[in-house]
Amino acid sequence: MKTLAVTPGVKDSLELLEMDEPAESDGSVLVEALDVGLCGTDIEIITGQYGEAPEGSKHLVIGHENLGRVISAPKDSGLSEGDLVVGIVRRPDPVPCEACAAGQWDMCRNGLYTEHGIKGRHGFAREQYRADADALVRLDPALTGVGVLLEPTTIVAKAWEHIERIGKRAFFDPKVAVVTGAGPVGLLAALLGVQRGLEVHVYDRVEDGPKPDLVRSLGATYHTDTLTESGVLADVLLECTGVPSVVMEAITKHGLDAITCLTGVSSTGKELQVDVGGVNREAVLGNDVVFGSVNANRGHYEAAAEALKKADKDWLGRLITRRVPLEQYQQAFERQPTDVKVVLEIKAG
């Protein structure tokens, strides 16, 4: 079968390969891959910054954002032929640690987890794959064209869940939410904020293209100025860029008792002059909370599936700005100015 794979650690080694059909030992459910979404993680793996092949393999099949359809499944699996499914990216470590044993592999404490298309497991950019039923999430058929957005939605579903749990520390009645970055994760964070009835403000540098209209179509406010310049004082902030200067604004420019969630991963080596004493003083006197969040467990996948089911499907479809056939994969990685989410079509149509 056709697969899109890299040699981990080797820059620009991405190639279309023929590999064996998935082994039955991989899982009892056989899935036909439909779509794979691309993101910055894939770019970093392709440029050789990280990535780990499965044991015994030279190559790593890429692709963690995914959508597929069940070809066959055991009768007692809860899945049937034709079901629309998404494979859960992170799988618990084999020890397992206390968190993985509790089904919270997103909080793995020993780092022995594996991740499809990233760390120790082949990804979903292949014509077929196998998985056990507990590693698959069934989607509403109405999400056929947009279900590939589930995995990035899980990131912000987890972020919002943790924000709300932290909010229960004391009185918590948020009115205003800020999202920094209008990429796919930022836009989906804004969607979940609007679904919660909040006044949502989204900040990005782009002045034209699809992003401003996508934000406004949600009923949110789009900003091209900075958080400092706008004067918006948020109760909840989701930082989705990883840009150091934007991160510092999200940490320091907000209302009292604010909760800031960092989801963007920053590059290292960039230095900022920071008044640590001033930041500490404001955080302590303002009852601030700042926390980081990455990955997701099954509960977050299910919450994300409900959020997408409730969302406007036309709006979700507009997030996917390009669809590229697998055989033309090089074009998918040629960045276009109007790109929001680029999707590889593993199975056309």
Image (cartoon, helix red, strand yellow):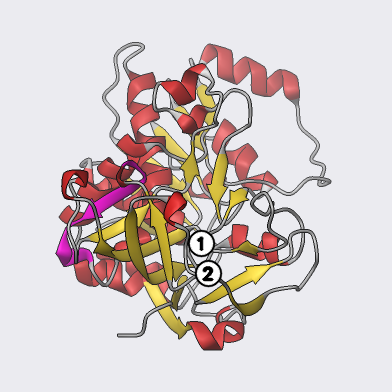
Q: Nearer the viewer, residue 99 or 294?
A: 99
Q: Nearer the viewer, residue 273 or 180?
A: 180
Relative vertical location of residue 228 with respect to residue 43 in this rendering, above or below:
above
Please check the rendered image and state whether residue 136 is part of the magenta-colored stretch, yes or no: yes
| Quarter of the view holding residue 202 | bottom left
Relative vertical location of residue 18 with respect to residue 155 in this rendering, above or below:
below
Question: Which residues fall within the magenta stretch?
Answer: 134-143
| Residue 205: % across, % down | 56, 64
Relative vertical location of residue 275 with respect to residue 38 in this rendering, above or below:
above
Structural crowding at the residue carrying mark 2, measured as other residues with C-alpha within 10 Å and reported as few (<14), some (14–19) or many (≥20): some
Decide if residue 76 is on the left or right side of residue 7. Answer: left
| Residue 134: % across, % down | 32, 41
Name the secondary structure under disc 1: loop
Q: Nearer the viewer, mark 2 or mark 1?
A: 2
Please check the rendered image and state whether residue 52 is part of the magenta-colored stretch, yes or no: no
| Quarter of the view holding residue 262 | top right
Tell me whether circle 2 and circle 1 mark residues in contact (CB < 8 Å). Answer: yes
Pointer 2 or 1: first along the chain: 2
Name the secondary structure under disc 2: loop
Residue 206, numbered circle: 2
